[in-house]
């Protein structure tokens, strides 16, 4: 009986203690509940928000690079009768302005090539790159398909230029302006979200109303000021 009484007494004391805590104001106070919930959810919501912002920035960069590739090839094809070294500067100026929001010029490379049939009808028949001009301060990239003069006397570019299965070639006396644009993506938040990204787009347009595809120099631009592919220059730091 003594043991039973002791157990009942212990339970009674424990009940009184718990009742005191239950009635205490600290137990009834729920004013900090929202703050605690916020502390738990804030990192998750912040992570989702930042990832969303980085995703949107990456999508905008893709759109911009795609537009620049089309802009360069299209503008090079719009020059009537002939195309000049001065036209090249105007084309690259347009690319610089278009990509200003993504810091395009120092982080990108544009390779603009004029592609034509090489004129042979024997085993040397194919395409050739008559001229090639480049823009941008990124030194890591060059053309994936050839350099100026390639294919002139052989069939090394028999199928044209471009990715496998999607090669572009000129027919007859036409010329094709082929633009390659490569850009080192600069993250808005952190490079850890998507890792290192290189964005690449290509575009090609047939020259309009132009049979002479030689790159002229009517404005007598010195050789050291031409946008040749051995230079890594921008509009703000032009060849000199």
Image (spheres, helix red, strand yellow):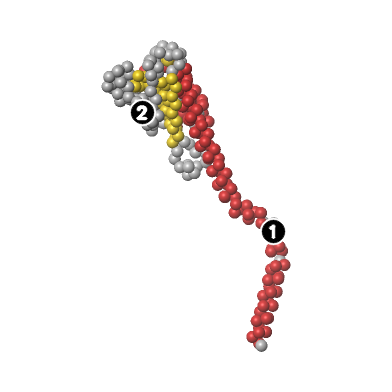
Placement of 104 over or under 19, stated as above or below:
above
* Residue in front for this viewpoint, 231 or 200: 200
Label 2 sits on a secondary structure element that is loop
Secondary element under disc 1, as helix, strand or loop, is loop
Q: Where does label 2 land, which residue? A: 145
- Counting from the top left corner in percent of width and height, residue 198 is at 44, 36
Q: Residues within 10 Å of mark 2 (few under 14, many from 20)?
A: some
Residue at image mark 1 = 30
Label 1 Cα crowd, 10 Å radius (few <14 / some 14-19 / many 20+): few
Q: Position of residue 8 (x, y in %)?
A: 67, 81
- Residue at the farthest left position: 123
Instruction: In this rendered view, identify the residue nearer to me: 164 or 91.
Output: 164
Per the rendering, the mark at residue 195 is none
Chain-order first, disc 1 or disc 2: 1
For the point 53% across and 31% down, which residue is it?
101
Going by the image, does 22 lie left or right of 65? right
Report the label total.
Answer: 2
Left or right, 207 with reference to 5: left
Q: What percent of the width, then of the height, locates residue 90? A: 47, 19
Q: Quadrant of the N terminus?
A: bottom right
Q: Residue at x 51, y 37 (%)?
A: 58
Rendered image quadrant of residue 213: top left
Q: Measuring from the top left, give residue 233's x and y in whole percent.
A: 42, 26
Q: Is residue 150 visible?
A: no
């Amino acid at each position: 009986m003594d043991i039973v009484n002791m157990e009942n007494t212990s339970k009674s004391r424990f009940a009184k203690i718990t009742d005191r805590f239950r009635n205490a104001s600290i137990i009834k106070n729920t004013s900090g509940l929202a703050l605690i919930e916020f502390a738990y959810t804030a990192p998750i919501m912040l992570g989702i928000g930042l990832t969303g912002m980085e995703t949107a920035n990456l999508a905008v960069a893709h759109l911009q690079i795609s537009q620049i590739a089309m802009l360069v090839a299209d503008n090079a094809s719009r020059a009537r009768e002939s195309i000049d070294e001065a036209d090249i500067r105007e084309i690259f100026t347009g690319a610089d302005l278009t990509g200003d929001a993504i810091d395009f010029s120092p982080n990108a490379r544009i390779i603009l090539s004029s592609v034509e049939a090489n004129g042979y009808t024997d085993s040397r028949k194919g395409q050739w790159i008559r001229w090639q001009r480049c823009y941008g301060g990124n030194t890591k990239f060059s053309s994936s398909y050839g350099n100026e003069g390639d294919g002139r006397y052989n069939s090394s570019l028999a199928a044209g230029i471009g990715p496998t299965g999607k090669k572009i070639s000129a027919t007859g006396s036409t010329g094709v302006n082929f633009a390659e644009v490569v850009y080192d993506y600069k993250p808005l938040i952190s490079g850890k979200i998507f890792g290192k990204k290189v964005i690449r787009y290509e575009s090609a347009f047939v020259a309009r109303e132009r049979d002479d595809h030689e790159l002229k120099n009517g404005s007598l631009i010195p050789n050291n000021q031409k946008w040749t592919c051995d230079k890594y220059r921008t509009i703000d730091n032009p060849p000199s």
